[in-house]
Image (cartoon, helix red, strand yellow):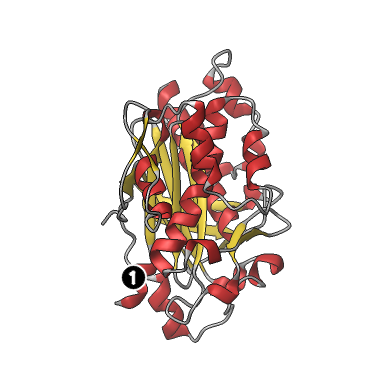
Amino acid sequence: MELERGVQRWGVDISNWDPNPQDFSFALSLLPPTFNHHTSITRFVRLEDRKRALVSRLLQYALVHQVLGIPYDEIVIKRTPEGKPYLENGKVGEEFPNFNFNASHHGDYVAIASEPLCLVGLDIVSLVIPWRETVEDFIRSFSSYFSRLEWDNIVSAGTSNDVLAEFFRYWSLKEAYVKALGSGVSYDLENVEFHHCNWKNISVKIYGRAMPEWRFWLSELGKGHLVAVARGHPRLATESYKKTLKYAEFDEEEYRKGLHLPNIDFVYRTVEEVVQILCKEVKSIPRIHNDNKLEETGDVQSPA
């Protein structure tokens, strides 16, 4: 099924990438100088934060280039007023009528997910808390974002580690839902209530109403990291994000095809592979090796 090719899930473990200044500058130079990409990355003081921001943007361009076949220098990625990235829709063909993507980063991982027709939201959480806080103190400040049922499930999960994991499961799903809508953090999260069977067959109720036009998946993304993916109907997007899509309404049969496309496992890529995708037409580029040295190479092929 051709639509299935628009369903992509990529993840990068940035803990394995320890770039020297030349490596980092070269990777940064791959991004278009427009749209404030550079300043939005270099504004961070900590290298780890810069790495996450940089790889997140590289993934967006690499995925669009590889899936849609748009020449890299013709890819235009903008952001809505709420900050959700989108591909300028003049570049999206009929093959994937509503191609959209969402990226997330936390801890050691950066990831991206795309959908050809439905909305997609993605959120990564690292199961850690500020070292001076207890689990109980940490989660207490978030209690207003959960329904009574969710909060009861969280605080009764078992040990402190169990409570923290349960908290982050619900939190990542809520974030994935909000990010799919393109609405930002102001959404009434306590009225977004998740139901599940051992964290499978996940469904949502909004203000007490079941929403069958949504599907959710929750899985582990490397040790100590969880990733949530949301897929929903385009008509539910915020007005600003809906304007970036070709179609907000579909007949029921066509929409169901998109909603019930198989969800796939995440494909793990290295920073080097992402760079290669963006540079495959360049005759000679500095190639990033595990020893963090730069080396001139010949033609670089896109990974399979």
User: For the C terminus, which image quadrant?
Assistant: bottom left
**Front-most of 208 and 31?**
31
Three-letter code for the amino acid on which mark 1 is drawn: Glu
**Front-most of 99 and 140?**
99
Residue lying farthest to the top in this orientation = 132
User: For the N terminus, which image quadrant?
Assistant: bottom left
The residue depicted at 47 percent of the width and 66 percent of the height is 71
How many numbered marks have been drawn onto this rendered protein structure?
1
**Front-most of 88 and 175?**
88
Looking at the picture, how far across and down is residue 189, in whole percent?
63, 48
Residue 237 in sight from this viewpoint: yes
Identify whether 259 is placed above or below 179. Answer: below
Element type at mark 1: helix
Residue lying farthest to the left in this orientation = 304
Looking at the picture, how far across and down is residue 267, in whole percent?
31, 50
The quadrant in which residue 236 appears is bottom right
Looking at the picture, how far across and down is residue 3, in whole percent?
36, 75
Identify whether 91 is placed above or below 264. Answer: below
The residue depicted at 53 percent of the width and 21 percent of the height is 135
The quadrant in which residue 9 appears is bottom left
**Front-most of 71 and 53?**
71
The quadrant in which residue 147 appears is top right
* Residue identified by numbered label 1: 4
The residue depicted at 39 percent of the width and 59 percent of the height is 281
**Counting other residues with Cα less than 10 Å from the Cα at mark 1, is it few (<14), some (14-19), or many (20 or more)?**
some
Looking at the picture, how far across and down is residue 18, in whole percent?
42, 26
Residue 154 in sight from this viewpoint: no
